[in-house]
Amino acid sequence: MTLPPTPSVTASSTPPSTTPPPPRAIMATRKLRHIDACLTGQVEFVGVSTGFALVELPYNALTQTSLADVNLSSRFLGSSLRAPVLIGAMTGGAELARTINRNLAGAAQQLGVGMMLGSQRIMLGEDAAARTAAVSFQVRDLAPDILLIGNIGLAQVSDTLAGPLTTALERVGANAVAVHINPLQEAMQESGDTDFTDSLQRLGRLTADLDYPVLVKEVGHGIGGAAARRLRDMPIAAVDVAGAGGTSWARVEQLVRYGEVRYPAVADWGIPTARALREVRHEMPDIPLVASGGIRSGMDAAKALAMGADVVALARPLLAPAIESTGAAVDVLGGFIEELRICLHCAGAADVAGLRRIGVTGCGD
């Protein structure tokens, strides 16, 4: 995939937070650059791991389970899942994004798992450009039964957003909406939204105004204990810890903006996924949790579920398969789910609840 070169800018040229939102054409091009970077660039964390290598799922040589009978079924945000898995948020707003989303949705329908859409900011509004952008998010014809979660950025949340966002969610047939919080990504992005003043209060008002469950998520640098304490009294439905150790969006944005990683320390900044999961579960013992950020195997998923996650999400491992076909995405995701099933069986757990009772050993720090 060849894209036109990104204009060179310097760190000192970052516009103030009052810069108007970029036109939809620029946002669509940026989405394509993100895809290109994630397919071809070194976008993973270098000095930070998820922490799952530091915990162990106990192996039980005398398991009393049958692999064929292991029950992975779960419920999340009011929907039934055949496995506790979500396809993580990726993209939208361009023709390639439409191909990706539709192939992912087809895979989700076949496997009975949920799916998050990429940011729907590009489709807000009633003009022709918004309706054109909306096409890339429309997957209900291929996936009528899945849990479908819409997406908007916390930086875009305002007291006038509830109406346009509701329209966008209705247009794609979403069951819920994720509000992604990404101050580090935005700080690295050319013309990023860098003013998060009063964003917590605006989030609270949005959750009260929407008739959709609201999931709050990071994008891969982690929600930890300090942020979780601020969310405790919010009327939100779930939290996705989206920890560090997988794709670094501070790295992606630097590659897109500069063609290189100018600030490697910032690119490797975040809360490892395993630690984020422990901290948020401690602060919010009753909230449904999604574990994402570097979840690369069924074993990672099993450890996350044993540590208290309700579901896990993965994104980048599905990107290249989703460009290829629905079948390619099914092959990768189906293998991931089968490995998760084997992990439950060989840990002696007949279902996800049993896996949580077993737990893990080690600290994950």
Image (cartoon, helix red, strand yellow):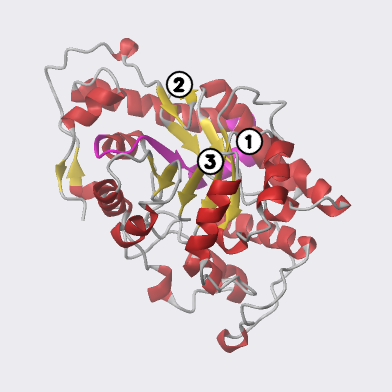
Residue plotted at (31% across, 53% down): 276
Query: Looking at the rendering, in which quadrant would you find the C terminus?
Result: bottom left
Would residue 106 appear left or right of 129 to someone viewing this image? Answer: left
Q: Secondary structure at mark 1?
A: loop
Q: Farthest residue in the left direction?
A: 62
158 vs 174, nearest the viewer: 158
Q: Which of the numbered marks, if any, corresponds to residue 258? A: none
**CB within 8 Å, label 3 to label 1:** no
Residue plotted at (83% across, 50% down): 126
Name the front one of labels 2 and 1: 1
User: Label 1 crowding class (10 Å Cα cut-off): few <14, some 14-19, many 20+?
Assistant: many
Tell me which amino acid carries mark 1: Ala
Name the front one of labels 3 and 1: 1
Residue plotted at (49% across, 79% down): 262
Name the front one of labels 2 and 3: 2
Q: Secondary structure at mark 2?
A: loop
For marks 2 and 1, the one nearer the N-term is: 2
Quick check: is 6 in the magenta stretch?
no
The residue indicated by pointer 2 is 82
Tell me which amino acid carries mark 2: Arg
The residue indicated by pointer 3 is 318
Q: Is residue 314 visible?
A: yes
What x and y, as percent, mark residue 42?
Answer: 48, 62
114 vs 70, nearest the viewer: 114
User: Label 2 crowding class (10 Å Cα cut-off): few <14, some 14-19, many 20+?
Assistant: some
Per the rendered image, the range of residues in magenta is 306-328
For marks 3 and 1, the one nearer the N-term is: 1
- Tell me if residue 157 comes above or below residue 92 in the rendering: below
Quick check: is 313 in the magenta stretch?
yes
Would residue 95 appear left or right of 297 to someone viewing this image? Answer: right
